[in-house]
Image: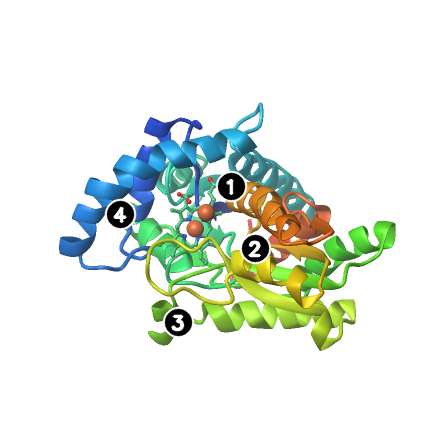
Amino acid sequence: MFGVLLVNLGTPDAPDAPSVRRFLKQFLSDPRVVDLSPWIWKPILNGIILNTRPAKVAKLYQSIWWDEGSPLMVISQRQREKLAIELSSLYGHEVPVELGMSYGSPSLSQGLERLKAQGIDRVVVLPLYPQYSCSTVASVFDGVAGVLKSWRRLPDWRMVREYYRHPLYIRALADSVRRLWDADGKAELLLMSFHGVPLRYITEGDPYQAQCQETARLVAKDLGLGNDEWQVCFQSRFGKEEWLTPYTDELLESLPGKGVKKVDIMCPAFSADCLETLEEIAEGGKESFIHAGGEQYRVIPCLNDDDGHIRLLAELVREQSLGWQVG
Ligand SMILES: C=CC1=C(C)c2cc3[nH]c(cc4nc(cc5[nH]c(cc1n2)c(C)c5CCC(=O)O)C(CCC(=O)O)=C4C)c(C)c3C=C
Ligand SMILES: [Fe+2]
Ligand SMILES: [Fe+2]
């Protein structure tokens, strides 16, 4: 029997400073995320970042937290439930789907143990990152391999590495834009804002930037947009190093001065709305744009638990498990 481990980044257990600190400590100690030498990084992390950032970021989490919990967690649970239903109707029998987060809970270890407890010995690991980056997908690989290090009997496992140009992904994104445009017309510019990474990761071989560009090009093509009707930008810069440009915040501040007063913005690298989309883009981005003289700023939600998104995830699982005798 095969099962699915649905993976995302993770989120703090609560929107308070101690929970955020615990989460950030685990996240920012991952050498795939911050690859600086531990001799340099550990004193900065423990001495400065973990003393100042948690209180500040906890306030931001409070501003987006839902009654049921962190948006990223609530949406991930809905994705898990719906994917399990979709797969069981596709295969005609139950296909267990468990959540595992790279940081925080439920952990990758808890997710894998839950699958094992259901008798699963073949696992499709599905990281919810459409574009490959060493800082996300490779860290999922490390995490899963790290858990399996202590298992006597390894499951047969496969991991979806990327799906940045999968036709169902492109269509789901384009449909999410069309839903807004059919109801309310289109803006002057469609911004596709991807999570950034340090530029150095790209020069050292990470294909993330090229994959983001390709996703954006395909979405624009599906929507029939001309070259001046869409643009790619990168958000959520962290630290002093140069990250991928143009930076979303700087771009939003500069657009009204260039005569662009109405934008629609979407975040195709995020499969679920989270702090980085609900606070940074929907709240902060809007404020910057309007303050700089912009007139209309609309945010297109992430794919979340949209039917088209769930169909895409089921198809990724099917493609990955093709070689297995199902049953
Ligand atoms: C060196 C730092 C970081 C890299 C590299 C990075 C890459 C990266 N992250 C995501 C997706 C998400 N990141 C989120 C939050 C977040 N990211 C960083 C830093 C790096 N990310 C931090 C420190 C944080 C926490 C918040 C903060 O302190 O600013 C989230 C949201 C989590 C939530 O709880 O809502 C997501 C999702 C991708 C896709 C990516 C590389 C491609
Ligand atoms: Fe991040
Ligand atoms: Fe951020």
Q: Please say if the residues under marks 2 and 1 sit with CB atoms less than 8 Å apart.
A: no
User: Cβ of disc 2 within 8 Å of ligand 1?
Assistant: no
Secondary element at tag 1:
helix
Image vertical order of residue 228 relative to residue 187, above or below: below
For disc 1, the marked residue is 275
The Cα atoms of the two marked residues, 2 and 1, are separated by 27 Å
User: Cβ of disc 1 within 8 Å of ligand 1?
Assistant: yes
- Please tell me how crowded label 3 is: few (under 14), some (14-19), or many (20+) other residues with Cα within 10 Å: some
Q: Nearer the viewer, residue 227 or 327?
A: 227
Judge whether residue 163 can be spotted in this image. Answer: no
Query: Left or right: where does residue 216 sit relative to residue 298?
Result: left
The amino acid type found where label 4 is placed reads Ser
Q: Earlier in the sequence, mark 2 or mark 3?
A: 3
Q: Residue 46 appears in which quarter of the rendering? A: top left
Q: Residue 34 appears in which quarter of the rendering? A: bottom left
For disc 2, the marked residue is 317
Q: Residue at 56% across / 45% down in the picture?
A: 284
Residue 202, numbered label:
3
* Rendered location of residue 324, percent (x, y): 51, 59
Secondary element at tag 4:
loop
Query: Left or right: where does residue 259 sit relative to residue 277?
Result: right
Q: Earlier in the sequence, mark 1 or mark 4?
A: 4
Residue at the left extreme of this rendering: 39
The amino acid type found where label 2 is placed reads Val
The Cα atoms of the two marked residues, 4 and 3, are separated by 20 Å
- Please tell me how crowded label 4 is: few (under 14), some (14-19), or many (20+) other residues with Cα within 10 Å: some
For disc 4, the marked residue is 29
Judge whether residue 52 can be spotted in this image. Answer: yes
Q: Residue at 62% across / 54% down in the picture?
A: 292
Image vertical order of residue 57 relative to residue 185, above or below: above
Secondary element at tag 3:
helix
